[in-house]
Image (cartoon, rainbow, N blue to C red):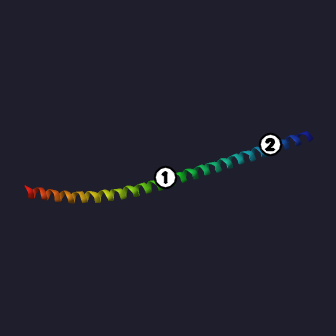
């Protein structure tokens, strides 16, 4: 039986070593997933900010176009009135 004690101890050490290595791998994988998830979320956040800025620019451009169109419509009305008076 004295020889069995060394083999048993070796098996325990091997098992504990395996458990520790697996635990470290699982924790490293979880940390890597968290980092990639955070990076992806930051990318989406930046994209959303750019989209909001682009939408604000589009809204401002729309307002400018509406103002120009109103100006053109009023000038066209004056031209039409003048043409009717000339006829």
Q: Is residue 80 above or below residue 3?
A: below
CB atoms at circles 2 and 1 under 8 Å apart? no
Who's the residue at 72% across and 48% down the image? 24
Question: Which mark is drawn over residue 26?
Answer: none
Label 2 belongs to which residue?
A: 14
Q: Residue furthest front?
A: 86
Q: Residue furthest right?
A: 2
Q: Is residue 14 above or below residue 83?
A: above
| Residue 68 appears left or right of 59 | left
Label 2 neighbour load within 10 Å: few <14, some 14-19, many 20+: few
Label 1 neighbour load within 10 Å: few <14, some 14-19, many 20+: few
Who's the residue at 78% across and 44% down the image? 15
Based on the displayed image, in which of its 4 quarters is residue 60 positioned? bottom left
Who's the residue at 61% across and 51% down the image? 35
**Which sits in the foreground, 65 or 29?**
65
Q: Pick whichever of labels 2 and 1 is earlier in the sequence.
A: 2
| Residue 83 appears left or right of 63 | left
Distance between mark 2 and mark 1 Cα atoms? 49 Å
| Residue 37 appears left or right of 69 | right
**Which sits in the foreground, 57 or 43?**
57
Label 1 belongs to which residue?
A: 47
Who's the residue at 51% across and 54% down the image? 46
Based on the displayed image, in which of its 4 quarters is residue 12 positioned? top right
The picture places residue 28, in percent across and down from the top left corner, at 68, 48
Q: Quadrant of the C terminus?
A: bottom left
Q: Nearer the viewer, mark 2 or mark 1?
A: 1
């Amino acid at each position: 039986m004295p020889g069995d004690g060394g083999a048993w101890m070796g098996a325990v050490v091997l098992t504990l070593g395996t458990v520790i290595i697996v635990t470290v791998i699982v924790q490293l994988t979880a940390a890597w997933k968290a980092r990639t998830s955070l990076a992806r979320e930051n990318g989406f956040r930046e994209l959303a900010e750019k989209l909001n800025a682009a939408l604000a620019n589009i809204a401002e451009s729309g307002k400018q176009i509406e103002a120009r169109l109103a100006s053109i419509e009023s000038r066209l009305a004056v031209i039409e009135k003048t043409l009717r008076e000339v006829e």
